[in-house]
Amino acid sequence: MYVSILYESFFGNTEKIAQAMAEPFGSAVLLKKIDNVSFDELTEVELLVVGSPTRGFRPCEKTKAFLKSIPENGLNGVKVAAFDTRIMLETIKSKPLRFMVKTGGYAAKHIAKTLQKKGGKLVAPPEGFMVTGEEGPLADEELERARNWAVQIIQQG
């Protein structure tokens, strides 16, 4: 199976998650920052995994631009999955801000919805991986959880 894991990362947390996800796929994976790839390079992809930090309840700008560049029905026959990194609610001291984050949503849901609109077949529910503060670090066990999530995706394939 030809797999592409594309990600955007500001502080390295999303990149670490993407790298951990790539491990179970072995040499069958293309792991790239999302701004270093164009959709035309993915013509042979069978599974596309896209990840982004959550910013303002949405994916980051480069991720949104990549998703927008995918032609309508460009992912027909392609399995897809989406993930994000997000701040742990417990670390947000302000109750109003915590409420806004909790109800505003996260990037993975929006990524998954766009991938599906472009024709992709979602093979796993959108997943979020926790950081302990705006710049991280990742919460304990998140790298292992990312590897396990990738294994679940492989088993779905």
Image (cartoon, helix red, strand yellow):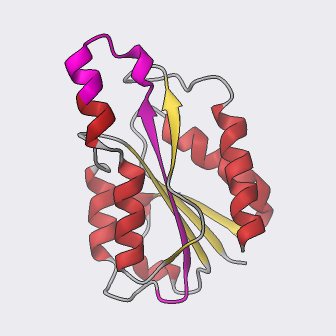
The extreme left residue here reads 96
Q: In percent of the image, x 51 and y 31: which residue is there?
A: 130
Specify whether residue 40 is in view. yes
Specify whether residue 28 is in view. no
Residue 22 counted in the magenta span: no
Q: Tell me the quarter of the image containing the N terminus.
A: bottom right
- Say if 56 sits above or below 121 in the image: above
Q: Quadrant of residue 63?
A: bottom left
Residue 82 counted in the magenta span: yes
Q: In percent of the image, x 45 and y 83: which residue is there?
A: 75
From the top left corner, tell me how far across and down residue 94 is, in percent. Answer: 25, 13
Point out the stretch of residues depicted in magenta.
Answer: 76-99
Q: Looking at this view, is 28 or 82 the one in front? A: 82
The extreme top residue here reads 93
From the top left corner, tell me how far across and down residue 132 is, in percent. Answer: 48, 20
Residue 62 as seen in the image, left or right of residue 34: left
From the top left corner, tell me how far across and down residue 40 is, in percent. Answer: 43, 83
Q: In percent of the image, x 42 and y 59: which residue is there?
A: 34
Q: How many marks?
A: 0
- Say if 55 sits above or below 58 in the image: above
Q: In percent of the image, x 52 and y 22: which residue is there?
A: 137
Residue 148 as seen in the image, left or right of residue 17: right
From the top left corner, tell me how far across and down residue 36 is, in percent. Answer: 43, 61
- Say if 11 sits above or below 65 in the image: above
Residue 42 as seen in the image, left or right of residue 52: right
Residue 130 as seen in the image, left or right of residue 141: left
